[in-house]
Image (cartoon, coloured by chain):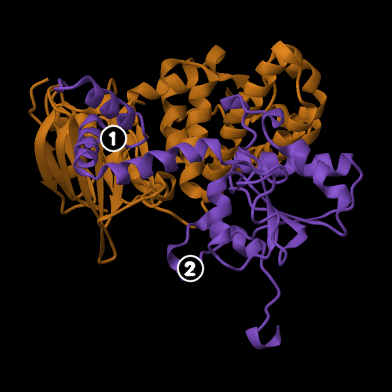
Amino acid sequence: MLTRLQLLHYRNHQSAGYSFDNQTVLINGPNGSGKTNLLDAIYFCCMCRSYFLRQDQLLVQHGHDFFRLDASFDNQGQTDEVSVKVVSGRKKEVLLNGVAYEKLADHIGQFPVIMITPDDTRLIQQYADERRRFLDLTISQVDREYLFDLQQYQKVLAQRNALLKQAWQRGADKEVLDSLDKQLWPAAGRIWQARRNFTERIVPGIQAIYARLSGNREVPGIDYQSDLNHADAAELHARTRQEDLAAGRTQAGVHRDDLLFTLDGEPLKQVASQGQIKSLLIALKLAAFHGDPDGRKPLLLLDDIFEKLDRKRMEALFSVISEGSWGGMFLTDADSSRSQDILRNQQVLFDRVVTNNPD
Amino acid sequence: MKLPSRIMEDAVTEFSRLPGIGKKTALRLVLHLMQEDASRVGQMAESLQRLKTELRYCKRCFNIAEDDLCSICMGRNRQHQMICVVESLRDLLAIENTQQYQGVYHILGGVISPVEGVGPEQLHITELIDRLPGLESPELILALNPDIEGDTTAFYIHAQIKKAGLDVRITSIARGISFGGELEYTDEITLARSLAARMPYQRNSDS
C-alpha cells in the first residue's frame, strides 16, 4: 500500500506532503482544488507517465521549471521509495530506492495500478488508438515481454514505413524490406497473442462485475478485432506487401487492432444507455487484473465515480468494488459527507485528505 | 565574443566547431596555444594537416590506413579468412583493445536505417561480399549493435551472401549477461534471452 506521497510543483500542488495509515483514502475538496491531480501523481509514480496528459512538461506548475514526486510503498514490512523528477530540457528520471532506472519500462508493473475516471468514456466514444492504449497500458503491467515487443514493433514499423515512403519515390530495396519484416513478424505475432489472451482472460470478470453493477440481464462482451485474427503475421505482411508499396505505408498489422464492446452481441455504441456504458467501463477496469497468474493486487484510483449516482447506486457500486482484491484504494469526491457516510456504513477504515489548492 | 584580434577570433571560431567545445573552452585553448613555443604549435598544425593529407581508408576493410591497405589487413599473423563486420572505426578499436581477436575486419560505415535515410547502397556491403570468393573457408563474425538497425543490417548481409551462393560460415557475437554482472540486476529481457540462447557447459580445463 501507499504510505506517503510528496508533491512539488505538480500541476496546482505547490508543495504538499501526505502520509496514509489506511488502505482506503478519501480525497475531498472543492472542484479545481487538485483532487484528480493527486490521483494522477500516484499514477505517475506507478506508470512513469500521467494518465491524462502525454507531455510531461504540461504537468509542471505554472511559473516553475520542474516537478518532483516522492512515494513510499509498503509491502509486508518492506518499504520501497519511488521518486519522479521532471526538469525542463532534461530526460525524466524515475528512481527506485534512490537508484535511477536506465529504462523506464523496467518500472512498469512493479506497482500495478488501475485508474477509473469519468474521462474513460473516451474508450468507447473515440478512436481505436484509445482502446489500444488501454490494452497496452494494462497488459504491460502484467507481461514484461509485451512492453518490449511493443517497443520493438513500433521501431521496426517506423523503419518499414520510412522505407515504403522512399520506395514510393525511388523504388524499394526488397531485401531491406525482407530484413525488416523478419523482425516485424515475430513481434506482431506475440503482441496479437498477448492481446487475445488478455481479452479472453478478463471477459468472465467483466460479465460478473457488470451483472452486479447494473442488475440487468444483458451480457457484455469484448470482440478483439485484428488483421491477425485470420492470418499469421508473416502471411499477412507478405500478402499486403504490394499494397503497402503502392500506398507508401504499412496498411495491415497489430497497429490497427481494435476492441469492439458488445451487449448481448450487439455493438455497445448502438444499443447502450449512458448508465450501461458507465457500468461496462467500470467492470472493464476492475476486471483488468482478473485471472492474473501472479495474483497482483493493483492500487485502485477512483476519480469521481459517484458522479450522478443516487445514494442506493453509490452503496451498490462501492460494495462491488470493495469485493475485489486491491493493494489500496484512493477515491475522490467533491461532496465530503456522502462518501464518508458510505465508507462508515460499510465499516471501512479510511484516511481523509482535503485539498484546497487555488485552481 | 569581442576579441582584440581578427586572427584570434578566427582561431576561436575554428576550435568551437569541434564537438563538445563551446566558445569559452575554445578561447581557453587559443590563449593556451598563444603561450606555447612556435615550434610546438607548428608540430600540432602539421600533425592535424597530415590527418587529411596522409591518411586514407583501407581499400579492403575501410579502416584508417597510411597505404592502400591498413596495418591489420597487411598483418602477417592475422587470419585473413576470418572477417569481423563492424559498424564503425570505434567498434573496431573496441574489439582490437581486447587483444583477443586474430582475424581481420570490415567496417560498414553505418547501419541500415530508412528513418535516417541510410540504405545498403550507402554502406560498404558490396565490398564485403566481393572480398569473400577469394578466401578459403571464410567466416564472417557479425559484431553489430543488438538493436533493430543492427539486426536489419545483419539479416541483409546474410541474404546477400545467400543470394551470391557463397559458402560462408556466419556467426554473431554472443548477447547476454555482462562479465562481472549480477543476475539479479540484469534486465529481464536480456536474462530471458540468455536463458533461451544458453550454451553447453564446459569447464576451462576441458578446453
Q: Give the image quarter of residue A231.
A: top right
- Image spot of residue B32 (x, y percent): 21, 42
> Chain B rendered in what hue?
purple
Q: Quadrant where the C terminus of chain A lies?
A: top left
Q: Nearer the viewer, residue A54 or A221?
A: A54
Q: Residue at x 64, y 61 (%)?
A: B174
Secondary structure state at the residue bearing disc 1: loop
Q: B87 or B56: nearer the eye?
A: B56
Q: Which chain is orange?
A: A
The residue that appears at 12% across and 39% down in the rendered structure is A353
The amino acid sitting under disc 1 is: Arg
> Percent x, y for residue B94?
53, 56
Calculate the distance from the C-alpha at mark 2 to the C-alpha at mark 1.
30 Å
Q: Is residue A89 above or below residue A95?
A: above
Residue A306 seen by the camera: no
Q: Residues within 10 Å of mark 2 (few under 14, many from 20)?
A: few
- Residue on which disc 1 sits: A90
Which residue is the extreme one toward the bottom? B205
In the shown orientation, is residue B75 left or right of residue A198?
A: right
The tag on residue B183 is: 2
